[in-house]
Image (cartoon, helix red, strand yellow):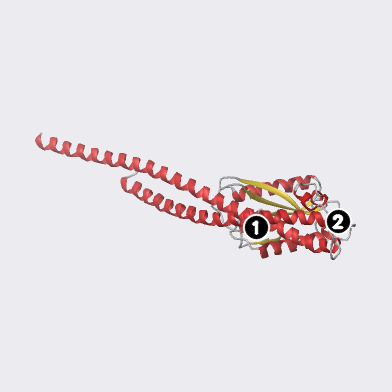
Amino acid sequence: MASVQDIKRRVRSVQNTRKITRAMELVAAAKLRRAQTRIEAMRPYAERMQELTAGVARASTSLRGLPLLQRRDVRKAAILPLTGDRGLAGAFNAQILREAFAIERRLREESVEPRWVVAGKKGASTLRFRRYEVSQAWTGFSDSPRYADAQAIAHYVAELYAEQEVDRVVVIYNHFESALTQRVVAQEVLPIPESLLEGEDDHSQALLGDFIYEPEPEQILERLLPVYVETELYRALLESAASEQGARMTAMRNASKNAGELIDSLTLQMNRARQAEITQEILEVVAGADALTA
């Protein structure tokens, strides 16, 4: 059995760890509130952008001259996982990468060559550790992404698609539902989904009507499509940021709870060890007294 002093040192160590996890939980909770506010404000804008794109596309007489709308046989596909820059967030990063590797296997089974682009230090380091070639990595903004960050990613993948270096772009991210629940989503951002352009969703019906476009709808759509891609990626980044803070807050709360249970268990062991030492000392005193009176 460990000595009382050894157990005391372990208790102090676990108590210090619990202070850290509690502080990280509070920081994550504060960041989560800000991230949740941002994504709730962003969602209506993104939905309106989808409606606007669908309305202009239906008014266009021809969509053949727009590179981001050209659908072709898929021979190369870009996989874009949105991970975090830091760990200690439970399964947040692991489930994104697990889905990304599953998509890669499916693409290879279909004889499609995958190309890796990644956001977040955790995703980039994991891919490089597994000796994957990473075409481009963006880091340093997973906690609080800006629209400029989404623009940089969108510009890069749109250029890849327009120059026919890839025939499909799939982004994988955690969709924020609550602090306890994050759902992995794999979304094809390029080419632009046909369902969006055909206006099959209920929201796009709001733009049905007689409109006069100036300049021509094709010209408007040419400028609108890159903005649509930027908006979708910005929403994905905000969803990912909120999900990361929610996962980290939950993970740190569980860590604090486990630390408390471990402290209780160690305290019980320490009391038993102290009682055993006291009992042993009493027996030694009694044995010494008996020896003197014998």
Q: Secondary structure at mark 1?
A: helix
Badge 2 is on which residue?
59
Residue at 67% from the left image edge and 63% from the top image edge: 147
Where does the C terminus fall, quadrant-wise? Answer: top left
Occupied quadrant, residue 162? bottom right
Where does the N terminus fall, quadrant-wise? Answer: top left
Mark 1 surroundings: few (<14), some (14-19) or many (≥20) residues within 10 A: many
Residue 127 is at least partly visible in this image: no
Q: Amino acid at mark 1?
A: Ala
Q: x, y percentage for residue 219?
A: 84, 64
Q: Nearer the viewer, residue 195 or 89?
A: 195
Q: Nearer the viewer, residue 81 or 66?
A: 66
Q: Amino acid at mark 2?
A: Ala
Residue 57 is at least partly visible in this image: yes
Badge 1 is on which residue?
124
Q: x, y percentage for residue 31?
A: 54, 57
Q: CA distance from mark 1 to mark 2?
A: 42 Å
